[in-house]
């Protein structure tokens, strides 16, 4: 025998017999006695602590078991860094392997195996051991003898009941397919011996059927199956299994332990009975199971009694959360009522939804620890995440890092375990005041949002909220106020009997109640007697009648409290007042003794008595544990008890067995079965001192089973000793923990020492406690938990001696400063001011006093005492000897450094100057508000301080203020330079905390005077993001406010503007920034008004009632909110001017100007200037001469300003200046100058991208030319204005133009029917288009039609590509578009266009650049779309983790993009890539639908253009050949005669080819139009059909319901003829009799209308027949009828034409195999021509006596041809014209009225495509008849 290479002293190792991920098993010999052994080793050289515990547990439990059926363990040897387990070798193999070797298991074999297993299980049952991992792999069988033995006790427990913790399915103990439901930790019950029965049942099932009851590779699916799914019956899989045996297995694997076997012997009895019958009869009769199944163990069922309704409420709430809600559930009731148990019931549905359930608990003795329950809960969640796969963990890491950015350390400071997922994070900028709070709140919200998604909703259970700290309550309120957090269920439990009226929890709940958050409250009451009776009957396995007497006694003692009931019943059993009678096999109770029992009515007192029955040492340990908290670890407890770890664990064991405490993890098993000799053995730990053990056993954690148990343990301590014990605990923790560990448990240490502070007399210990309180306060403050921080700081102050300022200055100053600032942050300004005054008096140095003064300035601002704040600041500056610039004049103007010199500037290091700069910064808000004239002096003082003493981060703030000041003074160049310096200082000093302020001020007040205002929007969003990231919520709100304003000013699409505005107003409302909300809503309202106003009476700005507007204006007046007032009057001025209410506009502009100082430096100033001037000039003709002079003077002054602004920023102001100048020139009669300036203004606005001002300039130019009586020119400008307003989305203005210039715009609004004879959809669209009151989608449809026309009108490829790319960009809202086509089987870029600011889009086409050689596109996306044929839409490319690797995305970082294939009849012909560089979420669903229609049209157009290009090339070649032939003829005259005939033939060929080309071109154009029409018709039909089908299908049941109701009413009238007077009055009021009769008529008319719409939709679908690209058999009459229905509007009477009668004479003809869509096209062409001819005839009065008629006949010719005749009685066709009617481009209609293609196309369809005939019979004045002959096949 070959010896294996592994070596273990004293053993020879032979063959390996088993190998897994964790373990190796070998056969070997024990050298001492040559005994065969099995040796089990851990595979890892450095196994984890849990692996060590489990491995050791196998030996600890099994070593003393000498049981049949249990493997014997000989010894546990040390091997490397772990153990080697030596076991007996009886020649066994695993039952799993044995089963694999056999096709099936005979029943006799099964019974033999099963009975051995049951016997082994009985032995474990008697030794009170729960195996917890029974499965075929842990059962060995000797193949020869069939002896069976159970192995592997690594998970086994000696506790009578274990409480499993909720962990990830990947970390569950045991083997998932065999796990009992309660072992999943999601069953709301503990694990006991019956869990092994479940696993045994699964093993039996697999043994007999060859498969598991639940098969899945998904752990969560398996867990859910164990919890909720019913397993199949064994006999349903293997019919040979007897039904009784199948039932036994089903009983074993019942979900609830109470439904399983309760006793091993009961199971054994049933199996033996089965075996006996099988041996006797080879069959088993049905019998009642469990007749002998009575357990002698006292087990109180863990079912919920009387709580079904409450559980349903919680589950319903969770189901709503799964649908996207956020809800708050409160469970109230006194202690022991069962709140936690009820909440745990939600765990089963959570598994189904793959959600996370986390919990945290507040501690009655640790109320000062901030966020304690939240921290516990998220530590729990982090542990669950760490158990997931590496791939999943990386996804979580990416999501968390994306959410937290560079501020992850803020959350790590609160939840240190997070670092295990996201890694070490950079330190964050320390913020003060509200900034820190805002940053923490934002980050915590983002942190939670990572875990609250549809894929995995989150449930947070916070227990004992009555003990929650204030920081937790504020955080709770914050989470529930965030409307963008979804899929979150917050459950809070609290003791309502311990919460008084003024309790902080109730105050918080009141505030939460004001939010629009669903709050459900469940108040649990005591159990009713009937529920107690059921509990007792289930416990004692007796009838309800027998349980009745005991129930009364239990209720009397416990008052129905579930917790008390359980402990009371348990104590009765322990005292043998309830015991099992083995003779009768039943439970008995001594009622008389129970009745006489004297018990405390208080459950805590009762528990105290129970605890006193424990050993003294155990009681002592529990006392200390109660002081530590509800949860405690072994190390901390051993320190405070001053015992060794082993001693402490040993003393806790009895409490564990009695259920007073429970282990929080499996590590406690390391100390299972230790003895008193072990605790006295000093070498015990040395024996187990192997790698990873010693450091981990210290962290074994326990928890009291209930708060009441903890309270009872605490009551064991005499009151006089409590302070001493807390002192001892605090001192021992302090002494025995490192500095790093102290930081983690600082609150624990301080809380204990504070309780015992009276016992601390030594000065050094006292000041040590002061420092500890200081550290605890700082930590709480860092977490924004200000209330507990205040308590720690104030407690430290209370400990200071009266002479502490003299003897302990530094710590005293630090404590007072922190206390003052924290009181201020905690909104206790009075106390903060008191502390600040004290610091000012006691501080020794100027710098120390400055800190107090700075806080004092903030306090005065908070109290709106701005003048006091200014005086305080000036006092400090004087102390710091900072010279104040008293007058702002040129001599005091600082010299600005050049941008190139900033690399070498001096850095400010003087602490006094830095302090001065901080004071000046703090002074700016109160000076700006209370003494605005001092602002220039303040700013120059700041700048002087920087230039003279060096620069710091605050220089960015100083210089942006200085830039604003200079721009306001008119020194725009210097102001812009100062602003640029501020931006550089931001980056140079990494002043991220100031970024929001600086970005907002620079972009709102400086950038616009030098650059296009379009450039500001992106920076406002950056400012907002930075403000949120660094807690500067105030300036984040200002950035959102300005963004809403500038969007309106510069954005080209009002629909985009409003969506964005509403998003950011929602953000402002969440942050309750009332000023910013009001200001932003002003700009949202004008955006809204311009889109939806349906009349020109636009006096109201905000609402439909002037009164509401006036109220707002008065409020702003009262609040001195002049900035909002100015904006309000400005937008009102704009609206009034745009809708021609000029005199009112002038009045509003005059009022608004009073408030212009509040808008200095803002873009709104120039807008007011612009519209004020326009209003004055428009009102000029209607006022007196004196007023006219005044008007012109104001306009002149305005123009002087505008001209100067235009010199610096022509992109913003030049076109405005030109437009006002044009209007003024018009008034002065300078018409040529006016015309020139109108054109300049139009061109400038268009070039710079100001579409609204381009529209306005065109409108004013049109008005000018109308006044000059030049209507044709006016129409050109008015048309352009009209379409500009449409593109802008100002539908109110479109309506205004339609009304005001209806006659002039008539050609646009009502195009002639002859223009579009074959396009009913287009007619419909233009009709809808003419009414601008319709929704935006009507406009979109119109846009599609226009775009389709533009595309269909292009046949040249180069021009088509240019048109296509411009059309797509405009309709999609993109600023970049790339079109790729296949060329030689390679993708190349054939067209590309970018929108460069406001410049006209200039596409580059036909460059054929290979995509892999281009840097203009993300190639990975293009390749994906080309292969998958899917449309990709990314709302935020930079936020997509999966796109980070694409070089294009990394380099350009587009905000959003779209990539879509262009497909024609299933073939990919192109790819379109669209991009928005600056805006996220541009490509909405609606825009995508429009693009789909456009790409469908584009596919047709591209294919046609390519074909035309090919034909053109062929034609050119022929032309070239012809030219060469002609040249050859000239040079070779002698050959003319010989070649004349040949040349003639060539010429004929050329003429024929050209004719074919013209024919092909005409056919392509018409085909393209009809294909586009078909696409649009099909789309419309589909969209209408869905809702009308829904309506139509519901009308019949609705009618039935109405009839039933009417019958019911009549019955009431019959049997109650004299109803109540109120009913009679109501009957008369509603006219009941008329209502009953009319209601059915209404329903009938609705039915008729719906049916009519269905017919129209069917006709549209029949007409389009897009799916019929090949020939199909169709009913030709259906096609004719559909065509007639679509032309019904032309057949009706319409001024001046009469109704046209249609006569149909249809014959019986079979279906025809044809191209249905093409044939429909023929019908519509012929019918349109007939209608045109009849209308033309009616124009002659001589024909008015003739009734216009069209006759349609069908029939058969011979047997193979169908005939369709369409005849009219119109004017007919002249004989000279008749031969040419089918020629392409030939028409008899007036110019512009026809294309000459209709009949040519029709002829080609009938003759060439269908091999039929199309003929015309006509005589002038007698009408015309067109005859179609089509073969049937």
Image (tube, helix red, strand yellow):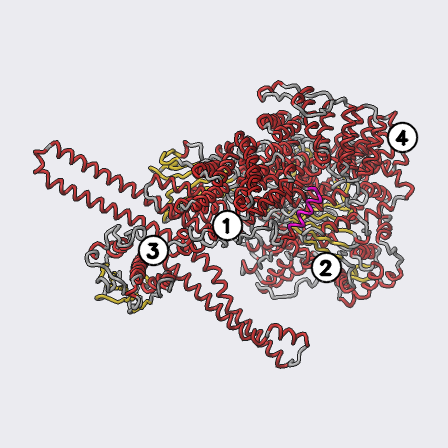
The residue where tag 4 is placed is: 801
- Which stretch appears magenta? 1109-1120
Please say whether residue 231 is one of the residues in the magenta stretch. Answer: no
Going from N to C along the chain, the mark reached first, 2 or 1, is 2
| Residue 590 drawn at (x, y percent) | 84, 62
**Which quadrant of the view contains residue 1763?**
bottom left
In the image, 1327: left or right of 790? left
In the image, 1144: left or right of 519? left
Please say whether residue 1116 is one of the residues in the magenta stretch. Answer: yes
Q: Residues within 10 Å of mark 1 (few under 14, many from 20)?
A: many
**Secondary structure mostly taken by the magenta-highlighted segment of the chain:** helix
Going from N to C along the chain, the mark reached first, 4 or 2, is 2
Q: CA distance from mark 1 to mark 4?
A: 76 Å
The residue where tag 3 is placed is: 1314
Q: Is residue 1027 depicted above or below 1801 in this figure?
A: above
Q: Is residue 873 depicted above or below 1487 in this figure?
A: above
The residue where tag 2 is placed is: 307
The residue where tag 1 is placed is: 1291
């Amino acid at each position: 025998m070959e010896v294996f290479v592994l070596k273990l002293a004293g053993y020879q190792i032979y063959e390996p017999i088993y190998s897994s991920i964790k373990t190796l098993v070998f056969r070997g010999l024990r050298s001492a006695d040559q005994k065969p052994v099995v040796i089990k080793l851990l595979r890892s050289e450095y196994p984890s602590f849990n692996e060590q515990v489990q491995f050791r547990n196998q030996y600890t439990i099994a070593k003393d078991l000498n049981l049949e059926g249990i493997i014997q363990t000989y010894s546990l040897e040390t091997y490397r860094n772990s153990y080697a387990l030596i076991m007996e070798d009886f020649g066994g193999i695993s039952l799993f392997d044995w089963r694999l070797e056999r096709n099936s298991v005979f029943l006799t074999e099964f019974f033999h195996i099963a009975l051995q297993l049951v016997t082994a299980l009985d032995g474990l049952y008697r030794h009170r051991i729960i195996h917890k991992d029974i499965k075929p792999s842990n059962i060995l069988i000797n193949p020869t003898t069939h002896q069976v033995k159970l192995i592997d006790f690594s998970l086994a427990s000696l506790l009578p009941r274990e409480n499993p913790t909720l962990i990830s399915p990947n970390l569950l103990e045991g083997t998932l397919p065999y796990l009992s439901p309660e072992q999943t930790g999601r069953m709301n019950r503990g694990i006991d011996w019956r869990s092994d029965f479940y696993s045994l049942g699964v093993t039996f099932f697999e043994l007999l059927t060859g498969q598991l009851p639940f098969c899945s590779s998904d752990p969560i699916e398996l867990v859910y199956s164990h919890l909720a799914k019913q397993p199949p019956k064994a006999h349903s899989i293997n019919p040979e299994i007897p039904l009784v045996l199948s039932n036994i297995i089903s009983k074993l694997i019942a979900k609830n332990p109470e439904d399983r076997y309760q006793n091993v012997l009961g199971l054994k009895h049933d199996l033996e009975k089965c075996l006996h019958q099988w041996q006797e009869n080879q069959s088993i009769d049905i019998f009642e199971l469990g007749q002998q199944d009575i357990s002698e163990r006292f087990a109180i069922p863990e079912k919920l009694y009387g709580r079904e309704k409450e559980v349903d409420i919680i589950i319903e709430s969770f189901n709503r959360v799964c649908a996207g809600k956020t809800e708050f559930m409160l469970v109230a009731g006194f202690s022991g009522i069962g709140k936690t148990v009820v909440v745990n019931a939600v765990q089963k549905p959570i598994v189904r939804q793959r959600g996370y359930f986390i919990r945290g608990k507040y501690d009655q003795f640790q109320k000062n620890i901030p966020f304690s329950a939240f921290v516990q809960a998220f530590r729990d969640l982090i542990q669950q995440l760490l158990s997931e796969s590496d791939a999943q963990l990386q996804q979580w890491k990416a999501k968390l890092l994306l959410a937290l950015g560079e501020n992850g350390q803020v959350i790590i400071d609160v939840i240190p375990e997070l670092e295990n997922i996201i890694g070490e994070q950079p330190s964050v900028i320390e913020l003060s005041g509200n900034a820190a709070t805002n940053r923490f709140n934002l980050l915590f919200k983002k942190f939670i949002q990572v875990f609250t998604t549809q894929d995995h909703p989150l449930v947070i259970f916070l227990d004992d909220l009555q003990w929650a700290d204030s920081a937790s309550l504020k955080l709770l309120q914050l989470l529930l106020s965030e409307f963008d957090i979804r899929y979150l269920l917050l459950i809070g439990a609290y003791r309502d009997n311990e919460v008084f009226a003024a309790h902080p929890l109730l105050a918080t709940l009141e505030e939460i109640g004001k939010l629009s958050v669903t709050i459900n409250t469940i108040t649990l009451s005591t159990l009713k007697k009937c529920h107690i009776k059921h509990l007792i009957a289930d416990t004692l396995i007796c009838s309800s009648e027998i349980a009745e007497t005991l129930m009364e006694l239990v209720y009397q003692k416990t008052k129905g409290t579930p917790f008390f009931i359980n402990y009371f019943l348990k104590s009765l059993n322990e005292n043998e007042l309830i015991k099992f009678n083995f003779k009768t096999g039943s439970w008995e109770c001594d009622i008389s003794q129970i009745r006489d029992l004297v018990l405390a009515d208080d459950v805590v007192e009762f528990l105290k008595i129970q605890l006193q029955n424990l050993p003294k040492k155990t009681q002592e340990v529990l006392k200390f544990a109660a002081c530590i908290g509800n949860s405690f670890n072994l190390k901390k407890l051993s320190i405070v008890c001053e015992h060794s770890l082993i001693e402490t664990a040993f003393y806790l064991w009895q409490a564990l067995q009695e259920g007073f405490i429970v282990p929080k993890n499996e590590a406690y098993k390391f100390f299972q079965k230790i003895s008193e000799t072990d605790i006295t053995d000093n070498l015990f730990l040395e024996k187990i001192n192997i790698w990873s053990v010693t450091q981990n056993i210290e962290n074994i954690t326990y928890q009291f089973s209930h708060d009441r148990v903890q309270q009872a343990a605490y009551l064991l301590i005499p009151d006089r000793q409590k302070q001493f014990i807390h002192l001892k605990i605090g001192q021992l923790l302090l002494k025995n923990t490192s500095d790093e560990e102290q930081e983690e448990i600082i609150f624990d240490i301080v809380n204990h020492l504070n309780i015992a502070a009276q016992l601390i007399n030594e000065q050094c210990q006292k000041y040590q406690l002061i420092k500890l309180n200081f550290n605890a306060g700082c930590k709480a403050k860092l977490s924004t938990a200000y209330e507990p921080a205040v308590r720690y700081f104030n407690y430290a102050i209370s400990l200071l001696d009266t002479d502490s300022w003299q003897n302990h200055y530094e710590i005293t100053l630090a404590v007072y400063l922190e206390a003052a600032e924290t009181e201020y942050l905690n909104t206790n300004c009075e106390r903060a001011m008191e502390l600040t005054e004290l610091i000012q008096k006691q501080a020794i140095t100027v710098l120390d006093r400055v800190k107090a003064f700075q806080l004092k300035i903030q306090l005065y601002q908070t109290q709106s005492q701005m003048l006091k704040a200014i005086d305080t600041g000036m006092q400090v500056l004087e102390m710091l000897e900072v010279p104040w610039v008293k007058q702002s004049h040129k001599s005091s103007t600082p010299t600005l450094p050049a941008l190139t010199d900033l690399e070498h500037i001096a850095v400010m290091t003087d602490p006094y100057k830095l302090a001065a700069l901080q004071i000046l910064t703090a002074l700016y808000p109160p000076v700006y508000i209370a003494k605005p004239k001092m602002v220039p002096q303040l700013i120059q003082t700041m700048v002087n301080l920087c230039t003279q003493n060096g620069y710091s981060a605050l220089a960015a703030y100083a210089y942006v203020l200085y830039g604003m000041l200079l721009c306001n003074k008119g020194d725009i160049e210097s102001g812009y330079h100062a602003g640029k310096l501020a931006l550089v200082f931001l980056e140079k000093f990494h002043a991220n905390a100031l970024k929001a302020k600086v970005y907002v001020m620079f972009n709102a007040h400086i950038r616009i005077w030098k650059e296009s205002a379009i450039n500001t929007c992106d920076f406002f969003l950056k400012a907002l993001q930075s403000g949120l990231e660094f807690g500067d919520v105030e300036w984040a709100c200002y950035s959102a406010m300005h963004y809403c304003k500038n969007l309106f000013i510069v954005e080209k699409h009002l629909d985009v503007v409003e969506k964005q505005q509403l998003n950011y107003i929602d953000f402002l409302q969440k942050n309750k920034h009332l000023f910013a909300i009001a200001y932003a809503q002003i700009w949202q309202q004008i955006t809204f008004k311009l889109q939806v106003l349906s009349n020109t009476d636009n006096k109201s700005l905000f609402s439909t009632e002037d009164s509401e507007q006036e109220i707002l204006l008065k409020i702003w007046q009262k609040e001195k909110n002049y900035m909002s007032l100015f904006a309000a009057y400005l937008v009102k001025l704009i609206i009034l001017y745009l809708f021609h209410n000029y005199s009112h506009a002038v009045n509003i502009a005059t009022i608004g100007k009073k408030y212009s100082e509040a808008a200095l430096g803002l873009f709104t100033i120039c807008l007011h200037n612009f519209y004020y001037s326009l209003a004055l000039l428009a009102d000029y003709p209607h006022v007196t001469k004196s007023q006219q002079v005044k008007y012109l003077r104001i306009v002149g002054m305005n123009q002087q300003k505008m001209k100067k602004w235009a010199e610096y920023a022509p992109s913003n102001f030049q076109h405005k200046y030109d437009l006002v100048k044009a209007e003024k020139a018009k008034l002065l009669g300078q018409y040529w100058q006016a015309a020139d300036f109108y054109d300049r203004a139009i061109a400038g606005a268009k070039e710079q991208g100001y579409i609204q001002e381009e529209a306005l300039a065109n409108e004013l130019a049109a008005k000018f030319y109308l006044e000059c009586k030049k209507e044709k020119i006016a129409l050109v400008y008015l048309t352009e204005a009209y379409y500009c307003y449409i593109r802008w989305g100002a539908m109110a203005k479109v309506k205004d133009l339609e009304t005001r210039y209806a006659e002039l715009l008539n050609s646009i609004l009502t195009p002639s029917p002859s223009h579009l004879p074959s396009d009913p959809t287009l007619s419909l669209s233009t009709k809808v288009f003419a009414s601008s009151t319709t929704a935006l989608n009507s406009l979109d449809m119109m846009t599609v039609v226009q775009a389709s026309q533009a595309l269909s009108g292009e046949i040249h490829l180069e021009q088509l590509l240019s048109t296509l790319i411009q059309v797509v960009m405009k309709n999609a809202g993109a600023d970049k578009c790339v079109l790729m086509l296949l060329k030689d089987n390679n993708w190349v870029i054939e067209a590309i266009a970018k929108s460069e600011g406001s410049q006209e889009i200039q596409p580059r086409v036909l460059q054929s650049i290979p995509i892999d050689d281009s840097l203009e596109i993300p190639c990975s996306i293009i390749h994906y779309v080309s292969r998958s044929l899917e449309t990709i839409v990314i709302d935020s490319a930079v936020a997509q983790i999966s796109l980070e690797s694409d070089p294009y995305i990394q380099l350009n970082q587009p905000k959003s993009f779209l990539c879509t294939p262009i497909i024609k009849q299933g073939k990919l012909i192109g790819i379109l890539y669209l991009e928005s560089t600056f805006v996220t979420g541009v490509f909405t669903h609606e825009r995508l639908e429009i693009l789909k229609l456009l790409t469908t049209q584009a596919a047709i157009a591209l294919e046609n253009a390519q074909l035309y290009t090919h034909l053109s090339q062929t034609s050119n070649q022929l032309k070239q050949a012809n030219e060469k032939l002609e040249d050859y003829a000239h040079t070779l005259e002698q050959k003319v005669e010989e070649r004349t005939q040949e040349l003639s033939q060539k010429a004929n060929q050329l003429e024929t080819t050209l004719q074919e080309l013209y024919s092909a071109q005409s056919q392509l154009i018409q085909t393209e139009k009809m294909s586009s029409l078909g696409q649009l018709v099909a789309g419309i039909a589909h969209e209408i059909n869905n809702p009308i089908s829904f309506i139509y299908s519901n009308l019949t049941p609705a009618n039935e319901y109405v009839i039933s109701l009417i019958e019911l009413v009549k019955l009431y009238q019959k049997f109650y003829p004299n109803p109540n007077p109120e009913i009679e009055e109501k009957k008369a009021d509603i006219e009941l009799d008329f209502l009953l009769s009319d209601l059915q008529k209404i329903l009938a008319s609705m039915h008729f209308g719906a049916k009519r719409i269905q017919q129209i939709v069917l006709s549209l679908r029949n007409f389009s027949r897009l799916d019929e690209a090949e020939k199909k058999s169709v009913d030709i009459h259906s096609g004719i009828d559909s065509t007639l229905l679509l032309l019904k509007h032309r057949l009706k009477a319409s001024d001046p034409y009469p109704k046209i009668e249609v006569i149909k004479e249809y014959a019986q003809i079979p279906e025809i195999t044809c191209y249905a869509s093409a044939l429909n096209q023929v019908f519509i062409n012929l019918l349109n021509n007939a209608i045109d001819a009849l209308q033309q005839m009616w124009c002659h009065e001589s024909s008015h006596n003739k009734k216009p008629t069209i006759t349609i006949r069908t029939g058969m010719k011979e047997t193979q041809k169908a005939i369709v005749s369409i005849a009219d009685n119109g004017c007919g066709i002249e004989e000279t014209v008749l031969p040419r009617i089918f020629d392409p481009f030939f028409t008899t209609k007036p110019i512009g009225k026809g294309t000459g293609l209709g009949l040519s196309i029709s002829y080609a369809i009938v003759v060439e495509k269908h091999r039929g005939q199309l003929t015309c019979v006509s005589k002038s004045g007698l009408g015309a008849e067109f005859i179609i002959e089509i073969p049937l096949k």
